[in-house]
Image: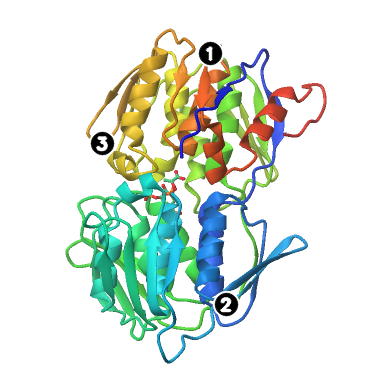
């Protein structure tokens, strides 16, 4: 539900200068939790994100029979027991607005013996689910659609088995449709061959992330192209090894803090930036450099310094669509226009992000045109306004970035940031109040 409480976005009265530690990656936490629940032996996760999305994942896995307990600094995961011979009582799973829960858990529910109904927040009922439903049916699993076709709520009639074999998935509206199938494929009867049949494929690094996590639990997952040049993945069935891992910090969530350095001519250092990662947030290093910032590493820390000049950018963000709201916020503060391309699939995110960004940025004075697959942003003199966030955490953080430079910007429902970053406000304020003379911490 949208809260009408307004948050006065703080203006930076000097360059921000802080060391920031961001909590664990939402996407990696979701994958590790799910794989740990689908393994045969208990696993231990450290640094897992605790936010609304990951709590929903945890609840979903617990409904299916896993046990996830926080102990000291670790999350212990006891896997889902084998399905009973007779169908269990019907279950309901609430997915909130979490794409990772609504798209990743239904395939796992097929391995449950019994009916599992999936529902979600009001805006979640508009997010595409057809390829999830279609993939389940291709796997021989019955699905009932209770609402609009191809949308939540649905019931997965799990039989405790997945067929495997060849499957075609149109993942042009979200990479999550492919990750959904791959994550559970090792538990199928036969080897899986998945071919993507859509005309575009967004967020490929997130699919690479899925393949990489599978390999880390001992599952063979290959990616190539078929004779027609279509993306193809193959997964060999096998036992999912238990893990003892440390989750990387969420680099997408580091974005608004790095952008604060760019917006205020400050310096932000983010701790524990991985050397090698499949997280799309790693692309901030290149994108912010192109926008005029200085970016460098000091050991495991990534540093970004604003130079006083923010350049507009022409960028294809299809692989890293999740970064669009942050880049769009900086584009509104830039000294030349920007075109952000390849992100038509953002219309199926938490909200229609293209429409939302075009509306809100234009309202502030940066004329923003909605393109078929992106945005054209024309910076102009900006003024304070009430910024609507449409239950979208990344719209809220985009507003906070602009608010650093624009007085009287009020954000509706800043609490929506709890989806992936529960203490966003506390971290933002401590970033702003760090004494630049001290080696501070946000
Ligand atoms: O697999 C994942 O963890 C995600 C994949 C991406 O989805 P889309 O491919 O729908 O953009 C990304 O935007 C989302 O935040 C998380
Ligand atoms: C698109 C996003 O989330 P979801 O996992 O709900 O798709 C996002 O966090 O930017």
As measured in the structure, the alpha-carbon distance from the residue carrying label 1 to the one carrying label 3 is 28 Å
Q: Nearer the viewer, mark 1 or mark 3?
A: 1
Which image quarter: residue 39?
bottom right
Q: Which residue is mark 1?
A: 406
Residue 352 visible in the picture: yes
Q: Residue furthest top?
A: 381
Query: Crowding at label 3, few (<14), some or many (≥20) Cα neighbours within 10 Å?
Result: some
Residue 333 in the image: state x and y as whole percent: 47, 17
Asked if the beta carbon under badge 3 is closer than 8 A to the nearest atom of ligand 1, the reply is no
Q: Is residue 65 left or right of residue 97?
A: right
Task: Tell me, for residue 343, which label it has, or none.
Answer: none
Residue 259 screen position, x and y as percent: 55, 28
Give the mark nearest the N terminus, 2 or 1: 2
Front label number (2 vs 3)? 2
Assess disc 1: are there few (<14), some (14-19) or many (≥20) residues with their C-alpha within 10 Å of its C-alpha: many
- The reply to whether residue 28 is in sight is no
Q: Earlier in the sequence, mark 2 or mark 3?
A: 2
Judging by the rendered image, the residue that carries numbered circle 2 is 79
Badge 2: few (under 14), some or many (20 or more) residues near its Cα, within 10 Å? many
Circle 2: element type: loop
Up-down relation of residue 6 to residue 236 (above or below): above
- Check if mark 2's residue and mark 3's residue have beta carbons within 8 Å: no
Whether pointer 1 and pointer 3 mark residues with C-beta atoms closer than 8 Å, the reply is no
Tell me what residue is drawn at x 20 percent, y 60 percent. Answer: 197
Whole-percent x, y for residue 76 in the image: 67, 69
Tell whether 423 sits left or right of 221: right
Which residue is denoted by mark 3 in the rendering? Answer: 373
Q: Please tell me which residue lies in front, 377 or 355.
A: 355
The residue furthest left is 228
Please name the residue shown 24% across and 73% down the image.
Answer: 137
């Amino acid at each position: 539900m949208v809260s009408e409480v307004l948050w006065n976005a703080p203006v930076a009265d000097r360059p921000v200068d802080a060391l920031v530690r961001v909590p664990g990656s939402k996407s990696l936490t979701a994958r590790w939790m799910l794989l740990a629940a689908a393994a045969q032996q208990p696993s231990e996760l450290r640094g897992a994100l605790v936010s609304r999305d990951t709590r929903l994942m945890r609840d979903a896995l617990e409904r299916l029979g896993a046990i996830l307990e926080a102990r000291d600094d670790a999350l212990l995961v006891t896997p889902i027991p084998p399905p009973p011979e007779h169908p269990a009582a019907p279950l309901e799973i609430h997915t909130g607005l979490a794409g990772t829960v609504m798209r990743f858990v239904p395939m796992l529910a097929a391995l449950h013996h019994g009916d599992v109904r999936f529902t979600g927040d009001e805006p979640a009922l508009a997010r595409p689910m057809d390829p999830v439903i279609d993939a389940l049916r291709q796997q021989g699993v019955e699905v009932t659609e209770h609402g609009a076709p191809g949308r939540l709520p649905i019931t997965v009639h799990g039989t405790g088995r997945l067929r495997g074999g060849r499957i075609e998935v149109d993942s042009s509206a979200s990479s999550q449709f492919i990750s959904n199938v791959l994550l559970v494929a090792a538990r199928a009867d036969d080897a899986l061959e998945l071919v993507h049949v859509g005309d575009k494929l967004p967020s490929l690094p997130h699919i690479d992330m899925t393949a990489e996590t599978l390999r880390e639990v001992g599952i063979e997952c290959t990616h190539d192209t078929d004779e027609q040049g279509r993306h193809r993945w193959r997964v060999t069935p096998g036992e999912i090894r238990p893990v003892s891992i440390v989750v990387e910090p969420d680099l997408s969530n580091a974005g608004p803090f790095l952008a604060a350095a760019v917006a205020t001519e400050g310096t932000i250092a983010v701790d524990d930036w991985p050397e090698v990662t499949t997280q799309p947030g790693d692309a901030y290093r290149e994108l912010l450099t192109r926008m005029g910032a200085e970016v460098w590493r000091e050991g495991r820390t990534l540093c970004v310094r604003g130079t006083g000049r923010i350049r507009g950018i022409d960028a294809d963000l299809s692989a890293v669509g999740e970064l669009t709201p942050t880049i769009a916020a900086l584009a509104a503060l830039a000294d030349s226009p920007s075109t952000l391309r390849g992100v038509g699939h953002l219309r199926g995110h938490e909200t229609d992000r293209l429409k939302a960004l075009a509306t809100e940025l234009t309202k502030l004075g940066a004329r923003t045109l909605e393109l078929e697959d992106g945005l054209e942003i024309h910076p102009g003199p900006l003024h304070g306004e009430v910024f609507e966030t449409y239950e979208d955490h990344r719209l809220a953080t985009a507003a906070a970035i602009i608010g650093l430079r624009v007085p009287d910007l009020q954000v509706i429902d800043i609490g929506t940031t709890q989806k992936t970053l529960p203490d966003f406000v506390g971290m933002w304020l401590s970033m702003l109040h760090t004494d630049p003379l001290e080696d501070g911490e946000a």
